[in-house]
Amino acid sequence: QVQLVESGGGLVQAGDSLRLSCTASGRTFSSYGMGWFRQAPGKEREFVAAINWSGGSIYYADSVKGRFTISRDNAKNAVYLQMNSLKPEETDVYYCASRSHAEPRRTATGYDYWGQGTQVTVSS
């Protein structure tokens, strides 16, 4: 059974940085694309960033380009999201997701496994 566990969320001020981590277990992590999404109450889950199996292909939502960086360490079965210059409107639950495919997608429906989420709160 695939398990994804996020960590690193918290309460920060606008302009601060956070680094989210997601560790995976239950299958060969290095073979699959990974993504980060976020969701506010009452809203749809929103794509943030994605990375393919090798880290050679990376995608970002336009709203986070230049501020967020996704990376992965296949030796540690982990994917990371470095978030800089955070904004209050980015207060959300952030989710890690895994696809059963080497390449990632920008849509939540393309992912088979999800973590439980980690809360990020950005105060103004």
Image: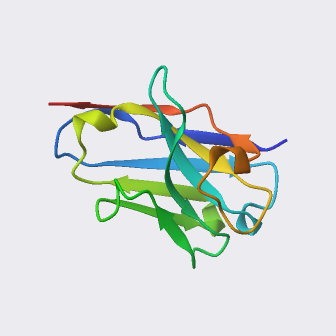
Q: Looking at this view, name the residue that lies furthest to the bottom.
A: 56
**Compared with residue 59, is residue 98 higher up or lower down, i.e. above or below?**
above
Image spot of residue 5 (x, y percent):
61, 40
Image spot of residue 13 (x, y percent):
18, 35
Image spot of residue 46 (x, y percent):
50, 42
Give the left or right position of residue 48, taking residue 85 as reference. right
Q: Is residue 120 visible?
A: no
**Compared with residue 56, is residue 46 higher up or lower down, i.e. above or below?**
above
**Compared with residue 121, is residue 51 higher up or lower down, i.e. above or below?**
below
For the N terminus, the image quarter is top right
Give the left or right position of residue 51, taking residue 83 as reference. right
Q: Looking at this view, name the residue that lies furthest to the top.
A: 42
Give the left or right position of residue 38, taking residue 101 as reference. left
The residue sitting at 57% across, 75% down in the picture is 57
Q: Is residue 99 visible?
A: yes
The residue sitting at 55% across, 57% down in the picture is 79
Image spot of residue 10 (x, y percent):
34, 32
The residue sitting at 43% across, 56% down in the picture is 61
Give the left or right position of residue 42, taking residue 53 as reference. left
Q: Looking at this view, name the residue that lies furthest to the right.
A: 1
In depth, the one of 47 and 80 nearer the eye is 47
* Colour scheme shown: rainbow
The residue sitting at 16% across, 46% down in the picture is 15
Count numbered badges in the picture: 0
| Picture quadrant of residue 119 | top left
For the C terminus, the image quarter is top left
